[in-house]
């Protein structure tokens, strides 16, 4: 009995030490290169930054920026992989290049507006457009990211956990629901249909268990509605095909797309 208690104490001490000493920044290059190599993507250099992340010019500068602020929500390599793969998903889907171009053009236009009232209106319109665009793009980047994680051997459920640790919207708070519920639900739906074995394996932490407990009534309701279930299955099957198509396109072109080509031409 003493030996068992001593063993458990040692194990607890090791886990506590690992949790306390885990340095996500030191894992970015190793985890990132694994994601790159296992998915057959072009090599890049990884850069952890405090500045707003803009990977729209990655084809030219070969640099993939990762937010230091987001990394603070990670506690292991799976969660670091989730943060990196979200950025890689946006790059593969060309949404990073699209956002970079729109920001560049919008800022150029705003710079030529002298009227303060018109400037404020144009700036607010720009931010609203980017916000609406980002919501859809972020969700697509998430599911592209989990495809990349799975291919590289990481647990894709870690992305749900990381998003759950981050700050959510005011809507999340008012409804007393998990942070970033729309994005995490989108990831779970995609995985449950396309990679059911990954969902079955689970993720051993309270954040994930709480998330599952919250969404289970919604899943049960959908599964008991034939039309809703058929719609769900059709949408998830189509989503997988679209992600595969986008990834293949990225590989064939070496990452080049119309958005960054346009931005390069505008800079000349």
Image (cartoon, grey):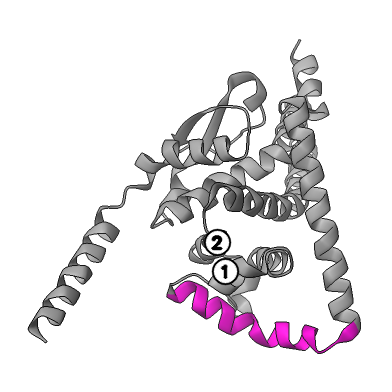
Q: Is residue 201 left or right of residue 30?
A: right
Q: Residue most toward the top?
A: 268
Specify the principal SS of the magenta part. Answer: helix
Query: Is residue 266 shown to the viewer in this render?
Result: yes
Q: Is residue 151 left or right of residue 258?
A: left
Measure the C-alpha gap from mark 1 to mark 2. Answer: 7 Å
Tell me which numbered mark, 1 or 2, is placed earlier along the sequence. 2
Q: Nearer the viewer, residue 54 or 61?
A: 61
| Residue wearing tag 2 | 163
SS class, disc 1 = loop
Give the extent of the magenta segment: 206-226
State the image coordinates of residue 71 (x, y, percent, origin top left). Answer: 44, 49
Q: Nearer the viewer, residue 112 or 250?
A: 250
Residue 253, by quadrant, is top right
CB under 8 Å between callouts 1 and 2?
yes
Q: Is residue 216 magenta?
A: yes
SS class, disc 2 = helix
The residue positioned 42% from the left and 56% from the top of the image is 74
Q: Is residue 37 left or right of residue 243?
A: left
| Residue wearing tag 1 | 179
Q: Which mark is residue 92?
A: none
State the image coordinates of residue 50 (x, y, percent, origin top left). Answer: 45, 38
Q: Is residue 91 magenta?
A: no
Residue 225, by quadrant, is bottom right
Q: Residues within 10 Å of mark 1 (few under 14, many from 20)?
A: many
């Amino acid at each position: 009995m003493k030996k068992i208690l001593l063993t458990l104490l040692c194990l607890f001490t090791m886990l506590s030490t690992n949790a306390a000493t885990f340095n996500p920044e030191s894992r970015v290059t190793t985890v990132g290169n694994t994601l790159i190599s296992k998915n057959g993507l072009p090599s890049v250099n990884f850069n952890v930054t405090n500045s707003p992340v803009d990977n729209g010019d990655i084809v030219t500068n070969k640099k993939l920026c990762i937010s230091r602020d987001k990394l603070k929500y990670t506690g292991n390599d799976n969660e670091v992989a989730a943060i990196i793969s979200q950025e890689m998903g946006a790059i593969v889907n060309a949404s990073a290049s699209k956002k970079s171009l729109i920001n560049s053009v919008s800022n150029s236009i705003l710079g030529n507006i002298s009227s303060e009232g018109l400037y404020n209106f144009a700036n607010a319109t720009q931010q609203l457009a980017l916000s609406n665009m980002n919501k859809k793009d972020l969700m697509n980047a998430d599911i592209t990211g989990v495809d990349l994680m799975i291919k590289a051997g990481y647990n894709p459920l870690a992305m749900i956990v990381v998003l759950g640790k981050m700050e959510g919207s005011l809507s999340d708070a008012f409804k007393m629901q998990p942070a970033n519920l729309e994005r995490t639900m989108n990831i779970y739906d995609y995985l449950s249909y396309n990679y059911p074995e990954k969902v079955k394996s689970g993720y051993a932490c309270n954040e994930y268990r709480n998330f599952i407990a919250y969404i289970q009534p919604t899943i049960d309701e959908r599964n008991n509605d034939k039309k809703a279930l058929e719609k769900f299955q059709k949408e998830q099957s189509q989503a997988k095909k679209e992600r595969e198509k986008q990834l293949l396109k990225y590989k064939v072109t070496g990452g080049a797309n119309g958005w960054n080509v346009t931005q390069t031409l505008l800079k000349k």
